[in-house]
Every structure is written in structure tokens, then in C-alpha cells.
Image (cartoon, helix red, strand yellow):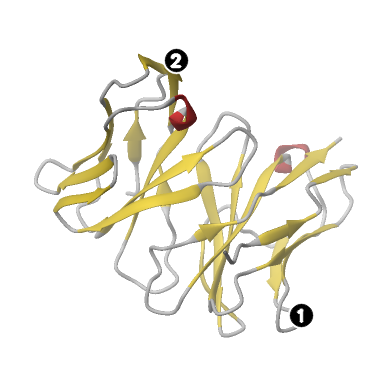
Amino acid sequence: QKEVEQDPGPLSVPEGAIVSLNCTYSNSAFQYFMWYRQYSRKGPELLMYTYSSGNKEDGRFTAQVDKSSKYISLFIRDSQPSDSATYLCAMSFDQAGTALIFGKGTTLSVSS
Amino acid sequence: EPEVTQTPSHQVTQMGQEVILRCVPISNHLYFYWYRQILGQKVEFLVSFYNNEISEKSEIFDDQFSVERPDGSNFTLKIRSTKLEDSAMYFCASSEFGVPYEQYFGPGTRLTVT
């Protein structure tokens, strides 16, 4: 089973807020966990990836993976209007050429 | 910064016609992928390609679909006889050898089947 669930939102926050985006999954064999950002009618843009469990920080973005709960999160600090987009979680097995399995995406709107 | 490019950006075709979608992956990448996204739906994996062979394909990728790397730079997706339900955004992606999780996507081709 390759299901990845993500609340589609929409999520509206004021500028400067901390945003929390989440995904759950069912297949415990997933090893890589990615977050992509997608603007309307554009291709997904890779933001961050995490291997197995743990945290990873990149500027205002922090990704967390809890494999025991099959739950991943992306936190955005000091959100900006330019962060307004759809955020997609994606997962894969540890295998060359393997598929990314995406969530449906959460639409975020940050107002100034 | 290197990027994946796709042509055309929008393709309109009639049901039953063949279409070829083209992609130029990032030059030092060795794995190539096609995904599709039906309006309002998830991005779905179609196929991955490495060393002139299909590595993995999904249930969506049936006999109507084929992929090819006709030369050293292009990667194509062919749909032999399009159906209305093939209308979607088609994304090409590529990744380096050894880092399959870092897949970089192109801007997509919007396919409309009438």
C-alpha cells in the first residue's frame, strides 16, 4: 500500500505566523521524505528531504519525521506572502529510480 | 542553475490521436521520470527510466504509453491513442545517480484531449 494523506486546506495565516503542514502515511518501508512547493500551474519545486526519522532545518523551514507514528511535518517560521503556494509531501523507498508517492498538497495563503 | 525543460507547454489533441511530450533533463542526471497531475488531484508517478530501460512503472502506464531517450539530451513520453481521461499536466523529472529522492521537476505540459 502506498497511501499518503495530507489535509488539502486551504490554510490562511497572517504574515509572520508559524505554519505547520503535516502528512501521514501507511507504508513503514518509506525511507525518504520530501517536501515540494508548487505554484499554480507550475512544476513541483524540491524544498527539503529527510532520510528516516529526525529533524532537518534550512533557513525558515524545518522538516520533521516521526517514523514510529508515520507522521511528517514541515514548519515555516516567519511566513511571508511569497510562501503562498501548495505544499506537497512526497515519500519514497530507498531504491534507485523509485517513484515518489505524493500527498494531495496543502494550499497555503499568507496575507500581508 | 540547471533545470528540466519541457515542450510544448500546452498541447491540445483530439481523442484517439497520438501525442509526444518532450523533456530535456538536467545534463548530468541519469534517472528520468514522468508524472502526471489531473486537475485537483495528486501528482501520480507514471514511469522511471535509467540506462535506456524502464526501471519502474505504475498501473497507469499501460500499453498506450511509451518512453524513449532518442538522443543524448531528450526524453519523450508518447501516448498512442489519447483518451479524454488523459487530460492532465504531465511533468518530467530527473535525478542524479545515487540520489533518487532528489528529483527535479520541469514546468509541465498541459495536455487537453477533446
Q: Share a chain, discs 2 and 1?
A: no
As drawn, is A91 to the left or to the right of B25? left
Numbered disc total: 2
Q: Amino acid at mark 1?
A: Pro
As drawn, is A70 to the left or to the right of B114? left
Give the Cα separation between the discs numbered 2 and 1. Answer: 47 Å
Q: Amino acid at mark 2?
A: Ser
Residue B73 or residue A62, whichever sits in front: A62
Residue B13: give x, y in percent of width and height. Answer: 88, 44
The local crowd at label 2, few if under 14, some if 14 to 19, many if 20 or more residues have their Cα within 10 Å, is some
As drawn, is B95 to the left or to the right of A50? right
Q: Residue at x 44, y 31 (%)?
A: A83
Q: Quadrant of the C terminus of chain B?
A: top right
Q: Which residue is mark 2?
A: A111
Chain bearing mark 2: A
Q: Residue at x 35, y 32 (%)?
A: A6
Query: Is label 2 or label 1 in front?
Result: 2
The local crowd at label 1, few if under 14, some if 14 to 19, many if 20 or more residues have their Cα within 10 Å, is few
Mark 2 residue element:
strand
Q: Which mark is residue B70?
A: 1
Residue B83: give x, y in percent of width and height. Answer: 78, 43
Mark 1 residue element:
loop
* Residue B73 quadrant: bottom right
Q: Residue at x 48, y 30 (%)?
A: A82
Residue A67 or residue B64, whichever sits in front: A67
